[in-house]
Amino acid sequence: METRELRYFVAVAEERHFGRAAERLGIAQPPLSRAIQQLERRVGVRLLERTTREVDLTEAGAVLLAEGRAALDAVDAAERRARRTVDGPGLVLVSKAGASEELLAKLLDAYAAEPGAVEVDVQLCGPGEQERLLRDGRADVALLHRPFDATAGFDTEDLVVEGQSLYLPAGHPLSARPELRMADVAGLPLPRWPLPDGGYPDGAGPEVRDTAQLRQLVSLGRAVAVLPDSARHGLADDVVAVPLVDAAPVTTVVAWPAHSRSRALADLVRVATRL
Amino acid sequence: METRELRYFVAVAEERHFGRAAERLGIAQPPLSRAIQQLERRVGVRLLERTTREVDLTEAGAVLLAEGRAALDAVDAAERRARRTVDGPGLVLVSKAGASEELLAKLLDAYAAEPGAVEVDVQLCGPGEQERLLRDGRADVALLHRPFDATAGFDTEDLVVEGQSLYLPAGHPLSARPELRMADVAGLPLPRWPLPDGGYPDGAGPEVRDTAQLRQLVSLGRAVAVLPDSARHGLADDVVAVPLVDAAPVTTVVAWPAHSRSRALADLVRVATRL
DNA sequence: GGGCACCCATATCGCCGGGGTATCAATGAC
DNA sequence: GTCATTGATACCCCGGCGATATGGGTGCCC
């Protein structure tokens, strides 16, 4: 199976429409129809159920969509990482914007002092995006937060375990309490983070894309946030953090693709675990 | 990058010889040379250092070899798993030949009794091969033994933790002892298992490919073996198991590709954890 | 219910690119 | 110096990919 065929199939499977998929791929619709037919003939399985009005995935098609996305990511990762060995930074580290700031700074300082340290590029992104970057080779290593981020398929080392706090605007009624429980949070306007497809879940709170934006919304009194205790570092005094004594603990982990064998990555992970 | 290009590159990188690689690929040498040049031009990186006498990998080439193998496995897995949804068994489970026999039997029985259970194909293979089968889609789920088998990149659930015993021929001097320590094993003829490349490590013991063969070698007095306690089930009386009280505990885990979302697999794993 | 819009499939053509053979060029062995 | 080895180059051919034009089936609307 060629990656071209796989890309074509994934496009049709996602769009559920040959015309739109062809447009997205920058080709005409007839060759796309033919390519999918050839793919079905070669694999020996019907992948799409077409009527004249709609396109649906068969069971085999659903499997090929899921596995094919992972395979295309792996191919992209191979190309990106090979290219980066010559003209890019030695390592690309990705973390959520605004999260683990203090830990990240300590890690970068400690690694830079290591003999043989390579240049480390830091990417900040929205929640849930780190996984994608790690899979398709745009990043080599990530800081993730269990249990919020998916660590499936990566090697990980635990770095820090901490509790969570509720972050409120300074004048909020709850901000004077020495501690809170999850029950106190019920009904408050919790922010809604983007789903993997770019949409947002339903709910009352504001839509938010990164932690800097969230901080502003909290200080404006438009939202409250449940975040790890360490997020209080560098907080302006118009936002107050109150410990949530019964919130699930958050583990900050360093994660990397399981098959990685680079010396630089191994050094960085070793430094991280010794912080 | 097309899988064809990647396959060509991996062949040359592994053979370190354009002629042999071309032969292995079933094409002539000139188009292979040209394909590699095109790949280097497209990726924008020199992948191979050629002299007229030998071919060597550049740093970028080494990265592309490692990542490319993983990517090709992922593509193969996509095709195999899609094809299997229609004409193959619902699940393929792989375990080491002769290992976890009792647990495996219990698991298969319990899962078969589950409502909505699909057909489960059982593959037995040599140590270390399960990982490959899981990666390239020939298997969906595996029984592995930590810390011996690599679980990197898979989701796992622990099933059983057990100690290890030394397995000896019935007449062996140590066979009468009620328990042993690792120090007692030093100098005994431990079997040598195949390496991933098919060769064997150096050493005194006999070369062995599976547990049935090992059992025979032990009963013939040609080898002794350190195996999990549960291997004593179904043992003939010409082999004796003596507990090794200071051996590292072995955890039998069920492992599957992290991105798997199939209902059948989820059921099987759930049944396994409840055994 | 007839016309219409929508959407995937088929037919046909042109061209790019991958594969083959013949050959060259560089280098190390003797 | 000669020869064997090995990757690169030159050149040709054909299959396959993409484009355009068109067909055919189906739901919708007046």
Image (tube, coloured by chain):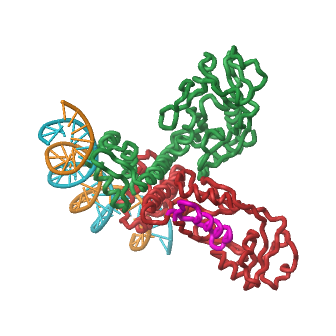
Chain colours: A green, B red, C cyan, D orange
Q: Quadrant of the C terminus of chain B?
A: bottom right
Q: Could you tell me how many numbered marks the image carries? A: 0
Rendering quarter of residue B30: bottom left
Q: Nearer the viewer, residue A216 or B63?
A: A216
Can residue B58 be seen? no
Q: Residue at x 59, y 34 (%)?
A: A122
Q: Position of residue C23 (x, y in %)?
A: 29, 65
Q: Position of residue A222 (x, y in %)?
A: 59, 19
Q: Nearer the viewer, residue B268 or A96?
A: B268
Rendering quarter of residue B212: bottom right
Q: Is residue A72 left or right of residue B157?
A: left
Tell me if residue B229 is in the magenta stretch. Answer: no
Q: Position of residue B123 (x, y in %)?
A: 56, 69
Residue span colored magenta = B90-118
Give the answer, above or below, for where D1 lies relative to A127. below
Give the answer, above or below, for where B188 lies relative to A212. below
Tell me if residue B103 is in the magenta stretch. Answer: yes
Q: Nearer the viewer, residue B114 or B63?
A: B114
Q: Residue at x 71, y 78 (%)?
A: B234
Q: Is residue A82 left or right of residue B111?
A: left
Q: Position of residue B121 (x, y in %)?
A: 53, 68
Q: Is residue A61 left or right of residue B15?
A: left
